[in-house]
Image (tube, grey):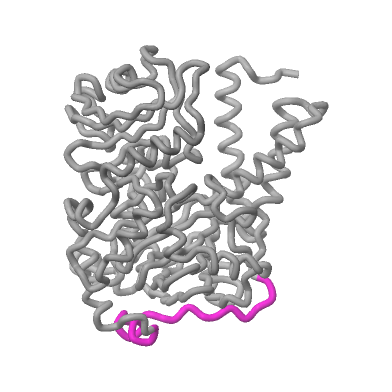
Amino acid sequence: VRIHYTGRLVHSGCVFDGSRSKNGGVPFEFTVGDGSVVPGMDDAVRAISLGEACRARVPPSRGYGQNGVHRLIPCNTAIIFDVILLGIDNQEVSAEEAQLATVNFLQDDGFSIEVIQRFKAPPELQAFVQLYKKLKDQKTAWLSALKGSREVPNYQGKRWVGLSNVGSEGLCVLDSTFLDCSWSRLRETWTWDFLQAPGWPKENLVLAKLKAPIRPDENLNDIAIVETTISSFVKYMLKIDPFDEEVPRFYVNGWQPSEFKVFGNDQSLKIPIVEDLTLSHMTDFEIEVNALLFGRDDKKAVSRACANAQANSDKLNKVFIGPAGATTRLHQDNHGAHARLTMLKGSKLYIAFHPQDAPNLYPPSASYIAENQTPRTASSTSHYSPIDPLNPNLDKYPNYKHATPYLALLTEGESLLLPKNWWHCAYSLSPSITVMRNFWSSSNIDDLIQLQKRELEMKLRALKAAGLLRTS
């Protein structure tokens, strides 16, 4: 069978898995009764006909049992599966019927302030709102309020290569004149009215999180993750009073536009002066890997390699959508990648710290991360800080007073360039859309090479174990 599904915890409604909010919304396929899914999923599918949908409450005995799933599903926990049956063997519902069934089924819950008020706003929100009431979007006021902070300088160079310093080759801000022509097109297209209107791809599901990034020591009892459509999320977001300390601020964190081609052929906002070697290096690497696995006589190897490289590069482009008060917690990006963050709509406050400030930010030890990591958080940031720079607990983290925060208040069209390993967090000052890309340049390409080597070694081990590795 081929299905779309969402799995939730009963007590909180938090999403632990789903087909429509990952992998480009491709339906999940399995054989009923072969043990590849929990019995409760088999039960749900057996209860409906082709094209139908159901909501199945699954007891622990038909779900994940006494053991649960480490840090995702507690022991002896009931779960809910929302299931839409799209295909049985060679029978399929049409794309139109599948879309209609999906949209109609989604209308049961929606995503509104009334629905999400069952979640408690994190304490960081109160600290933000109290400051926001006084400072609004005044950059000088924020600099004065955060003691010892410095302003991120504007870019004034010819080529950005990603050095670790503060300035035109390192941490800096660019205005909209450095963006390519896709900026003006996207700004005109991505209005709030456009995002609230029904239709594909806005009716597909995305994940909205109350806390992001998710830390390796957290589980679904600590956080809240829900699925929603972009249109429902934007309607919720625009209703929020920015001075309200009680309404939780969910955040569409890390939506990959390449999955649904929402940007057409422009999968990111390009900045010509930024050195980005990611795609060219990934292409060369994929060509060599294809030659290793399939031989150099394979006529389709080059085109396959180029397509794989483009897809992998596109996955590094992400969209963040959030209301005033939405927060990205203090962290470093993974795999030694640089980051560029461009404001498409709204305004946002970024606070960054030099990599050498790490001892003052109290990151967890490597052994602690290893003990708490799971497959779900393995792709999440492992380098995080427990400190909220807007309300630091100096009794618990006294060395933070020695850290130097760098502030950037971005408005529409402005971009922040973050070199590798710079710590950063963000606070939305208004309903906002940010386009982010992780990438590698000549200053950090070795980090990408090491990442690719590890991934290739894993692939080769899997092929060898399956008896599929070429030996000639």
User: In this image, 272 relative to 84: left or right?
Assistant: right
In percent of the image, x 42 and y 77: which residue is there?
Answer: 409
Q: x%, y% of residue 142?
A: 34, 81
Left or right of residue 83: residue 256: right
Task: In the displayed orientation, state which residue is furthest to the top.
Answer: 34
Q: Which residue is drawn at 39% across and 58% down?
A: 331
In the drawing, does residue 1 fall left or right of residue 302? left
- In this rendering, position of residue 59 left or right of residue 360: left
Residue 152 belongs to the span the image colors magenta: yes
Find residue 376 and report its horizontal and vertical position in percent: 38, 39
Residue at 27% over, 37% down: 8
The residues colored magenta run 139-159
Query: Which of these two is toward me, 20 or 441?
Result: 20
Quarter the C terminus occupies: top right
Q: Is residue 232 above or below residue 353?
A: above
Q: Is residue 148 visible?
A: no
User: In the picture shown, does residue 156 fall above or below 63?
Assistant: below
Residue 178 in percent (x, y) is at 63, 74
Front-most of 318 and 194? 194
Q: What's the residue at 54%, 58% (across, down)?
A: 437
Q: Which quadrant of the structure image shows residue 369? A: top left
- Is any part of residue 281 visible from this angle? yes
**Residue 387 vs residue 287, the one in the foreground:** 287
- Residue 398 belongs to magenta span: no
Which quadrant is home to the N terminus? top left
Q: In which quarter of the image is residue 325?
A: bottom left
Q: Where is residue 272 in the image (x, y as percent from the top left)?
A: 68, 67
Depicted 369 relative to depicted 37: above or below: below
